[in-house]
């Protein structure tokens, strides 16, 4: 599932439609998801900017609950369609490697979160993860408590972290998890797109 529910207030326009290296971030992310698992569904409360993508669009099951609500929508869709988990990717991450997503999906289970470790302050990348359908109850309980942090329910579920050394087999984590929130970051993403470093497993397919 591609999470595209944000208002892009820091960017000033739907950032997923911004171009990086001659392609929209949206097309990059959708292509990566489809290469990883064969299907991509967009989670967005405002479908307008994404109608041209030609993929199913799902509004949040609990509108106004931010990214955590988007993840709840993803796992709800997964349960409705007979899947064990929902693979989640943010719409503003143009360089995530499809083989990494495929690994996370393969490690997923109904009652767990399969997530990539990162160099970031949280130590994990919650918008590059597979969320088991049984996480829905814990996510809903967190939202009922007024929680909005993406990892606010992690203490209540089994979290399977792919170690950073394994993540690096698929590419440079700093590049893979780079996200575009502002115009200056889009320009930096253009520079990173030109670099196109190879990973040991041919990880970056963006």
Image: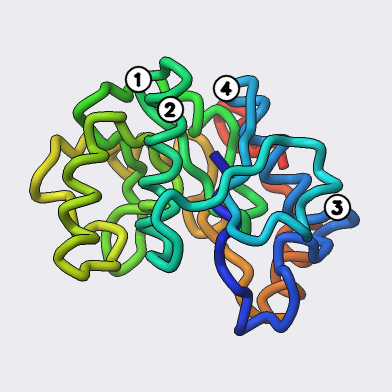
**Which tag, 1 or 3, sits closer to the chain's start?**
3
Quadrant where the N terminus is found in the figure: top right
- Rendered residue at 24%/57% (across/down): 151
Mark 3 or 2: in front is 2
Image coordinates of residue 131 in percent, x first then y, are: 33, 36
| Furthest residue toward right | 22
Mark 1 or 3: in front is 1
Mark 2 to mark 4: distance in Å? 13 Å
Image marks 2 and 1: residues in contact by CB distance under 8 Å: yes
Mark 2 or 4: in front is 2
Classed neighbour count for the residue bearing mark 1: other residues with Cα under 10 Å, few (<14), some (14–19), many (≥20): many
Residue at image mark 3: 23
**Which tag, 4 or 3, sits closer to the chain's start?**
3
Residue at image mark 2: 78
Image coordinates of residue 185 in percent, x first then y, are: 66, 76
Image coordinates of residue 183 in percent, x first then y, are: 73, 81
Question: Helix, strand, or loop for circle 3?
Answer: strand
On screen, 96 above or below 82? Answer: below
- Rendered residue at 23%/30% (across/down): 134
- Rendered residue at 41%/39% (across/down): 167
Mark 4 to mark 3: distance in Å? 21 Å
Of residues 108 and 197, the one drawn nearer to the viewer in this rendering: 108
Residue at image mark 4: 37
Mark 1 or 4: in front is 1
The colour scheme applied to this rendered structure is rainbow
Q: Return the mark for residue 84.
A: 1
Mark 1 to mark 3: distance in Å? 32 Å
Classed neighbour count for the residue bearing mark 2: other residues with Cα under 10 Å, few (<14), some (14–19), many (≥20): many
| Furthest residue toward left | 156
- Rendered residue at 14%/66% (across/down): 145
Q: Quadrant of residue 46?
A: bottom right
**Which tag, 1 or 4, sits closer to the chain's start?**
4
């Amino acid at each position: 599932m591609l999470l595209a529910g944000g208002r892009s207030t820091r960017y000033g326009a739907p950032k997923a439609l911004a171009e990086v290296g001659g392609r929209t971030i949206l097309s990059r992310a959708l292509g990566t998801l489809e290469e990883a698992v064969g299907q991509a569904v967009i989670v967005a409360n405002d479908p307008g900017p994404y109608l041209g993508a030609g993929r199913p669009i799902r509004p949040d099951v609990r509108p106004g609950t931010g990214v955590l609500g988007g993840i709840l929508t993803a796992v709800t869709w997964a349960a409705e369609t007979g899947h064990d988990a929902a693979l989640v990717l943010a719409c503003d991450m143009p360089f995530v490697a499809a083989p990494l997503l495929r690994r996370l999906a393969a490690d997923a289970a109904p009652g767990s979160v399969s997530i990539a470790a990162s160099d970031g302050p949280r130590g994990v990348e919650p918008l590059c993860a597979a969320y088991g359908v049984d996480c829905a109850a814990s996510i809903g309980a967190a939202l009922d408590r007024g929680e909005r942090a993406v990892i606010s329910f992690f203490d209540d579920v089994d979290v399977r972290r792919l170690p950073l050394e394994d993540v690096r087999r698929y590419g440079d984590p700093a590049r893979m998890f780079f996200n575009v929130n502002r115009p200056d970051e889009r320009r930096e993403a253009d520079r990173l797109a030109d670099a196109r470093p190879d990973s040991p497993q041919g990880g970056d397919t963006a």
